[in-house]
Image (cartoon, rainbow, N blue to C red):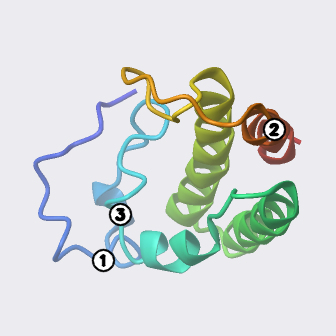
Amino acid sequence: MKQFDYSLDFKNIDFRQHPELYRVGKGEQGVLLVEPYKGEILPFWRFKTPEIARESSSKIYSLFLEYLDREDFVGADMARKFLQMGYTRSRRYANHKSGRKYQQNPQKLSLLQSKAQLEKIFCR
């Protein structure tokens, strides 16, 4: 697999028009760079509560299926990355009370338990 190319001019490239420039990369690489997909998917990416996370993951998954139907590999991969990012961020909040890996900032246990439930929603 080719590495994700961070040297591209992401502000000026439309990856729908130039999918040949897209590289999958590792994990969630490029998820917040690749347009127009970032702009289409990001507004639906939420995970504050289990209910919001369910709505979010359902909408992003439906976008994933739409991209597949249109044979838009870049869009489908970007939707997959947002779903994966929902899972990993939810897991981070469950593992690290503050949501930050390297800073301790204790929060209420109920919030922590709620965040742990969110990962299951994005991973279904």
Question: Which badge, 1 or 2, comes first in the chain's sequence?
Answer: 1
Q: Position of residue 101 (x, y in %)?
A: 44, 23
Q: Position of residue 82 (x, y in %)?
A: 59, 53
Residue wearing tag 1: 14
Q: Nearer the viewer, mark 3 or mark 2?
A: 2
**In this rendering, is residue 98 above or below 7?**
above
Is the residue marked by circle 1 packed among few (<14), some (14-19), or many (20+) residues within 10 Å?
some
Residue at left offset 38%, top offset 41%: 29
Q: Quadrant of residue 65?
A: bottom right
Q: Amino acid at mark 1?
A: Asp
Is the residue marked by circle 2 packed among few (<14), some (14-19), or many (20+) residues within 10 Å?
few
Residue at left offset 31%, top offset 70%: 18
Q: Amino acid at mark 2?
A: Ser
Q: Nearer the viewer, mark 1 or mark 2?
A: 2
Residue wearing tag 2: 110
Residue at left offset 44%, top offset 22%: 104
Question: Which badge, 1 or 3, comes first in the chain's sequence?
Answer: 1
Q: Amino acid at mark 3?
A: Val
How far apart are the alpha carbons under marks 1 and 3? 8 Å
